[in-house]
Image (cartoon, rainbow, N blue to C red):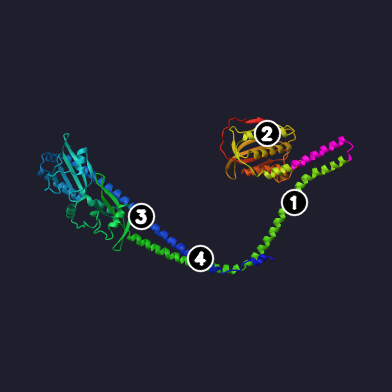
Amino acid sequence: MAQPSPAHQIRKPRRVKARFIAPLALVLIFIMGVFAAAILKVEADIRDQDISERTAAVGNLFVQKLDKDANLMIATMRALMTNRAIEHAFLDRDRIALSRQLDPLFASLRDKHQITHLYFTDPDLVNLYRFHSPGEFGDKIDRLTTIKSRDQQDAVHGLELGALGTLTLRLVMPWQSDGRVIGYLEIGEEIEHLISEVQKSLSVDMLVLVDKRMVSLQQWRNGQALMKREGNWNRFSSHVALAQTVDRLPAALDETTLRSLFDGHTEEIKDQGRSLHLSTVPLKDVSQRRIGDLVVIRDITELETTFQWSIISVTAISLLAAVGVLGVFYLALDRVEHDYRRQHDLEHQLLRYNAEYGRILQLEKLSALGTMVGSIAHQLNNPLVGVINLAQLAERGVDDPIRTRELLGDIRSAGEDCRAFVKHMLEFSKVSCFESKPTSIAELIEDTVLLFRQTEDHHLPVEVKLPDKPVMMTIDPILVRHALFNLLVNAAQATTDGSAIVITLEPEDDPTRGISGWSLAVNDHGRGMTPEVMEKIFVPFYTTHSDGTGLGLPVVQHVALLHDGQVNVDSQPGHGTRIAIWLPESSSDSTPDVQPDVSKNY
């Protein structure tokens, strides 16, 4: 059954627009969806990064303000300790004198620096005078700051929960006079003004939450009355608010949100149309015990609104752009669909051209095969013609044994030539198989030269020039030795005046690929080659010698290519020839047991 022609195998034109517009629209919708999701993800990451940075800034600024106020307190205490009148009143335990001396100063410190506490305590830690509550005295002060100051005999400061349920920055310093401690000064400030200063600096609200295990209900109520606030003890099960920069707590701030914040996460809540981003900073007292958390509240309503409008604008622009792209694409596809019908004629022509090209390629292959067969036939025909002629002469001279023996010797010589040629052909066909291993180039050259000296009849001198440091390369020594041997044979054939053949091994970089390697070169001082001859030296079976096979240099080139190298030829008529095998450096140099000579003459 006849096969259909290529023209009949061409499919009919299909509607291009219907096949492309719908998938393109789906792809554009998918891309826009991915784009919108990516923008939302980026926006969420930006918000998280912003709240993280602001929380870190709140924590750092809070600590800095604690240290700054502590230093101010230390300076105030030292100034008090230099006042002799205050010192005598303290030594005499004269409460009236202390009040007269320090009431105006305490009022100034309270109004200008928010100092809320000033204590005078005797060496037994019994309170002598409280300037914010003069009527309360005589009780023992056993807070950690006071005890640590007594034990360390140095100034100690840190956050502590007071008796009224307030969180206070306290500084306690021993007062020494004439080498003995006459008592302790304590100065403190409530945490409210500190968080207010941080709020003004960083534009974030804050809420101070203290673990209920650290404060009793009565203490908390006393603190609320002192600060003139009405809090809700039962708002949270585990914590209670001691101070805040907001007028009221957000309704969405519940126990679940707090637990997530205490676990180190950030949260977003809505409160009366506002978007709030929350995170926490741990609060630790003077003993580094975690007593609560500072909740950072960032109002991101304006930022979120701006971003939403940006999303809407970008989405609208993207939709318009997508519609425009679809329109342009539709028009383009309409033209493509119109032109697509003309493709059949082109396909017919291309099929015809491909068929013709295949026939031409087959003819070229057959021509190349014919050329190779002709070359092989030529190489074998010459000695075979001689064999036939010599055999005919031998038949005529059977009565002359001496002459017959001579003719048989010539026949044998011609047969050996044919066998040698066939052997070279087999070697040429097997040269693609090789096995690389680390090889000393000096030893390889030495072995090759010795083999050459045994087979070369003219006993030409061979000079070898090697680098000072032995060279080891990962190569196939058999193939490289065979290639070097071919170069030596060619050099010997070109040398007519008995001059030396020079073998050199030099480091050389490949300028094209920029990699390092070694150049193994054979120089002769023979007749050289013309440009016409140099163009054909790597063509198989091409030779300028009557007894040559034309396979020596093609084998050399093939060996170099198998090693990812190349062959470089430099020759001028009358000035000799230099043929170098360049091989990439595939292994580091190593020193063998026997150090070869740098230069040898054979």
Check disc 3 and report the residue beneath it. Answer: 48
Queried whether the magenta region covers residue 405, the answer comes back as yes
Q: Could one spot residue 203 in this view of the protein?
A: no
Q: Residue furthest right?
A: 399
Observer able to see residue 471: yes
Cα separation, mark 2 vs mark 4, equals 72 Å
Label 2, secondary structure: give it. helix
Give residue 544's quadrant in the image.
top right
Residue type, mark 2 in image: Val
Q: Secondary structure at mark 1?
A: helix
As drawn, the label of residue 23 is 4
Residue 449's disc number:
2
Which span of residues is magenta-colored?
396-421
Local secondary structure at mark 3: helix
**Which residue bears the numbered disc 1?**
370
Point out the frontmost of discs 2 and 3. 2
Are the two marked residues, 3 and 1, in contact with CB atoms closer than 8 angstroms?
no
What residue sits 61% from the left and 30% below the top? 596
Q: Magenta part mainly helix, strand or loop?
A: helix
In the image, what residue type sits under mark 3? Asp
